[in-house]
Image: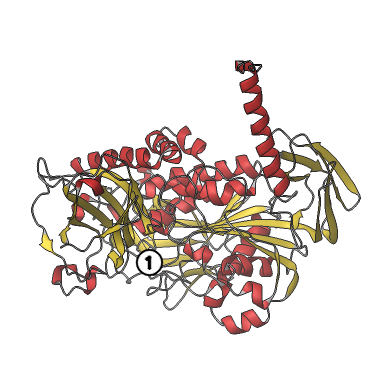
C-alpha cells in the first residue's frame, strides 16, 4: 500500500482559505441580493448620488438599474458589493433591479425619489400615533400615497451589524401602518408636505428609555478620551461574555468603593463583608414599593438583594447559567463576588458562569437593582429564578432573600457598556450601522430625558452624536432637535433643575451650528405624563423648523422668540429677543411670567417682574442691581407665558449679564 504524503503547511492554509471563501460565498448566495433598505415602496434621496448595496457571491459582478440609470460593481471576498447611481429629481414610482452575473436577481417596485428623514431618540420619538390626541380620527385619515414608513427593528449589539436584527419593510402610509408608527415623525412629514410637495421617506429608529451614549459609535466615543475603558470592555464582552462581565464587575466594584461615606471593607457582593442594614425580603419579591414597607413606598434609587444557593460538588463542577427573571430597571449581578452580568428590564436567557466560580456548599448571589422611575425591583417571577446546570437540571433560587436600601448620596451606579438602552454604542451598532450610508435629507432627534442627570456631559455628547452621524450620512446633514417638554410639578419658588439645564444645553448646541435647529415644546408637555400626547403640534413646529433650516425659508422664524443678550439698564435688566413674529405677547397677565434674576452663587435667584417693550423684556426685582444671570422657564415643569404673535413660545434659557455691566 502506498502511503500518502502528509499535508504541507501551504496546502493546509490553502484549504482553510478555500473553505472560508466557500462558506462566505454560500452565505452571500443565500441572502437577498439587495440590502433590506431597498424594497418595494422605498424612498431614496432625491438630488444626490444614490448609493445601492447588498450581498452576492464573492467576486460576482452585480448590475443595478433605476429609471434608465445603471451601474455595476463586483462583490468582494466577503460577498459585499456597492454601486453609485447618478442623482435623480423627485418623482416616481420606478423599478429598481439588481442582477448578478451568476444569475441571482432581485427587484424593488414602486420606488420613489423624495426626501428621507431619520427619526431617532427615546420613548417620545417612539410614541405611536395611536397614543396621541384624537388618535382615532388621525388613523382613519392616514392614507398618504407618497409618505412611506420604515421601522428599524429594535435590537442592541456589542458589535456593528450589517443588516437589521429582524425582517422589516417599507410601507405606504395607511391606517394600518401608521397606527404604531412614530407620531412625531409622521406628523412632521404630513405637515411638511403641505409646503414641500415631494415624497417623504421616514425611517424610525428609536428606543424608549435610551440614553444618548448607546446611539454613538465606538470610534466616536473613543475619540473623546472619556470612554476608552468602556469601549475596551464592550470589545472584550463581544468576544467572551464571561470575561467581559467579570471585567465590568471589577470596575463596578471600584465605583462602589469610591462612594462617599462607604465604610471600609463594605462589599455587599461578599458573604464575609456584606455590610450592615440587611432586612428580610418577602418570599414573592416583586416591586418593592408594594411590600408595605414605609421607607420603600416612594423610594427611587438602588437596592441590593442577596440569597444563597446550596450545591453539591458534582453540581458546582458543571457549566451553569444564572437566571434571575425580570428586573426593573437595571441589575448588576454577582456570584461569589464576581460580576456575571447586567441587563435593562429583560435579563434574557440568563448569565453564563465560568467553571470554577461555583463551589460545593453555599454560593452567594448578590444583585444590585437601579430603579429611576416609578415601581422597581427584582420582579421574578420565582419560576424564572434558577440556576440551570449543564446536565439539564436546575436549582431554584427559592431560599430566603434579603435586601438593603442604598443611600441616594451614593448616586446612580455606572451602566454596563453592553446594556442596550444605557450602555455605549449598542444602538449605534444595532439600529444605525445597518442603515449603512443611505441617503438622508435630515435627522430628527427627540431624546434627553434619560440624560438629565448630567446636562453638562450631554452638551459634549449631543455635539458628538451630530458629528458622528454626519460622518456616516453626509457632511452638514441637518439636525432638528426637540427640546424636552415640561414634566412634573409646577414650581412655587426658584430652584435648580437638571431638566432646565439640559434644555439650555439643547438650545446651545442647536444655536452653534448653521445646519441645526431647535423645536421648543415647553408649553405642550404634560406635568403628569412624561409622554405628552400633543404630537400634532410638535410635528407642525418641526416642519416649520425644517422649512427654515433645511429648505431656506429665511423669512420664517424657526421656533418662537430666541434670547439674544441680557444687559443692565439702571435698576433693571433688559433681555433682547430675535426671530420674533408679530411682536412679543404675554398670556394671562400684563407681563410674562417665568423670569428670574440671579446672583453669581447658587440659591440667589428671585422671580422678576417682567414688562414687554417691543422685542425686549424689562426685568425688575429686589436683587436686580446685583444680578449676574437671567433665567427663564427654569424648572422641570415651569409656568411660562412669553410667546410671539405666531403663537410660538420662548424656550427656557439662562444668559449671563456681562460683567462690565454688573453693579460693582
At 63% across and 15% down in the image, what residue appears? 5
Residue 609: quarter of image = bottom left
Q: Residue placed at 28% from the left, 49% from the top?
A: 413
Q: Residue 362 placed where, x, y %?
A: 15, 50
**Rendered image coloring scheme:** secondary structure
**What residue sits right under mark 1 in the picture?**
594
In the displayed structure, 349 sits above or below 267; it is below
| Left or right position of 309 against 175 | left
Viewer can see residue 39: yes
Q: Position of residue 27 (x, y in %)?
A: 67, 44
Counting labels gives: 1
Q: Is residue 312 above or below residue 248?
A: below
Q: Looking at this view, name the residue that lies furthest to the front.
A: 1
- Front residue of this view, candidates 245 and 226: 245
Residue 394 quadrant: bottom left
Q: Is residue 359 above or below residue 59?
A: below
Q: Where is residue 623 drawn, in percent x and y?
A: 27, 57
Q: Residue furthest left?
A: 276
Q: Nearer the viewer, residue 110 or 188?
A: 110
Element under label 1? loop
Position of 586 compared to 183: left or right? left
Q: Is residue 410 left or right of residue 66?
A: left
Amino acid at each position: 500500500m502506498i502511503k500518502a504524503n502528509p499535508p504541507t503547511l501551504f496546502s493546509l492554509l490553502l484549504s482553510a482559505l478555500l473553505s472560508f471563501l466557500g462558506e462566505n460565498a454560500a452565505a452571500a448566495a443565500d441572502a437577498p441580493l439587495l440590502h433590506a433598505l431597498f424594497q418595494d415602496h422605498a424612498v431614496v434621496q432625491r438630488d444626490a448620488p444614490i448609493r445601492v448595496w447588498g450581498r452576492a457571491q464573492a467576486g460576482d459582478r452585480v448590475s443595478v438599474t433605476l429609471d434608465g440609470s445603471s451601474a455595476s460593481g463586483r462583490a468582494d471576498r466577503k460577498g459585499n458589493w456597492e454601486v453609485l447611481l447618478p442623482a435623480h429629481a423627485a418623482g416616481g414610482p420606478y423599478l429598481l433591479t439588481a442582477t448578478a452575473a451568476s444569475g441571482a436577481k432581485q427587484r424593488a417596485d414602486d420606488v420613489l425619489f423624495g426626501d428621507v428623514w431619520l427619526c431617532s431618540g427615546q420613548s417620545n420619538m417612539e410614541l405611536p400615533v395611536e397614543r396621541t390626541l384624537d388618535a382615532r380620527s388621525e388613523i382613519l385619515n392616514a392614507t398618504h400615497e407618497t409618505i412611506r414608513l420604515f421601522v428599524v427593528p429594535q435590537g442592541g449589539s456589542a458589535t456593528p451589524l450589517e443588516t437589521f436584527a429582524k425582517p422589516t419593510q417599507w410601507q405606504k402610509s395607511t391606517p394600518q401602518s401608521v397606527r404604531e408608527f412614530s407620531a412625531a415623525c409622521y406628523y412632521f412629514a404630513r405637515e411638511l408636505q403641505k409646503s414641500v410637495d415631494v415624497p417623504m421617506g421616514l425611517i424610525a429608529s428609536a428606543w424608549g428609555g435610551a440614553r444618548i451614549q448607546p446611539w454613538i459609535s465606538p470610534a466616536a466615543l473613543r475619540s473623546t478620551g472619556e470612554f476608552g475603558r468602556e469601549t475596551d470592555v464592550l470589545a472584550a464582552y463581544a468576544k467572551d461574555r464571561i470575561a467581559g462581565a467579570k471585567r465590568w464587575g471589577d470596575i463596578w466594584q471600584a465605583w462602589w468603593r469610591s462612594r462617599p461615606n462607604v465604610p471600609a471593607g463594605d462589599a455587599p457582593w461578599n458573604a464575609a463583608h456584606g455590610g450592615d442594614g440587611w432586612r428580610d425580603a418577602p418570599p414573592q419579591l416583586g416591586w418593592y414599593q408594594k411590600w408595605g414597607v414605609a421607607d420603600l413606598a416612594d423610594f427611587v434609587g438602588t437596592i441590593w438583594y442577596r440569597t444563597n444557593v446550596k450545591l453539591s460538588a458534582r453540581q458546582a463542577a458543571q457549566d451553569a447559567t444564572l437566571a434571575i427573571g425580570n428586573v426593573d430597571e437595571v441589575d448588576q449581578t454577582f456570584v461569589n463576588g464576581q460580576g456575571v452580568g447586567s441587563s435593562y428590564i429583560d435579563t434574557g436567557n440568563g448569565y453564563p458562569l465560568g467553571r470554577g466560580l461555583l463551589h460545593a456548599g453555599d454560593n452567594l448571589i448578590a444583585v444590585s437593582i437601579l430603579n429611576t422611575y416609578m415601581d422597581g425591583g427584582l420582579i421574578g417571577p420565582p419560576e424564572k429564578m434558577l440556576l440551570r446546570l449543564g446536565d439539564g437540571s436546575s436549582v431554584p433560587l427559592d431560599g430566603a432573600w434579603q435586601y438593603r436600601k442604598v443611600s441616594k448620596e451614593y448616586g446612580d451606579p455606572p451602566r454596563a457598556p453592553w446594556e442596550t438602552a444605557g450602555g455605549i454604542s449598542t444602538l449605534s451598532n444595532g439600529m444605525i450601522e445597518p442603515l449603512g450610508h443611505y441617503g438622508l435629507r435630515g435627522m430628527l432627534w427627540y431624546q434627553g430625558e434619560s440624560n438629565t442627570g448630567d446636562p453638562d456631559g450631554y452638551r459634549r455628547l449631543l455635539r458628538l452624536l451630530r458629528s458622528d452621524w454626519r460622518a456616516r450620512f453626509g457632511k452638514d446633514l441637518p439636525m432638528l432637535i426637540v427640546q424636552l417638554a415640561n414634566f412634573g410639578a409646577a414650581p412655587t419658588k426658584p430652584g435648580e433643575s437638571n431638566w432646565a439645564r439640559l434644555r439650555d444645553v439643547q438650545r446651545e448646541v442647536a444655536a452653534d451650528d448653521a445646519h441645526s435647529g431647535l423645536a421648543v415644546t415647553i408649553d405642550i408637555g404634560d406635568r403628569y405624563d412624561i409622554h405628552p400626547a400633543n404630537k400634532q403640534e410638535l410635528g407642525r413646529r418641526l416642519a416649520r423648523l425644517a422649512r427654515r433650516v433645511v429648505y431656506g425659508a429665511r423669512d420664517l422664524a424657526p421656533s418662537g422668540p430666541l434670547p439674544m443678550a441680557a444687559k443692565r439698564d439702571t435698576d433693571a435688566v433688559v433681555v433682547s429677543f430675535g426671530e420674533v413674529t408679530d411682536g412679543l405677547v404675554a398670556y394671562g397677565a400684563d407681563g410674562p411670567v417665568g423670569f428670574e434674576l440671579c446672583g453669581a452663587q447658587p440659591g440667589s435667584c428671585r422671580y422678576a417682574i417682567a414688562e414687554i417693550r417691543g422685542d425686549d423684556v424689562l426685568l425688575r426685582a429686589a436683587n436686580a442691581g446685583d444680578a449676574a444671570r437671567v433665567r427663564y422657564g427654569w424648572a422641570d415643569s415651569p409656568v411660562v407665558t412669553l410667546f410671539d404673535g405666531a403663537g410660538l413660545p420662548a424656550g427656557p434659557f439662562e444668559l449671563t449679564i456681562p460683567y462690565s455691566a454688573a453693579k460693582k
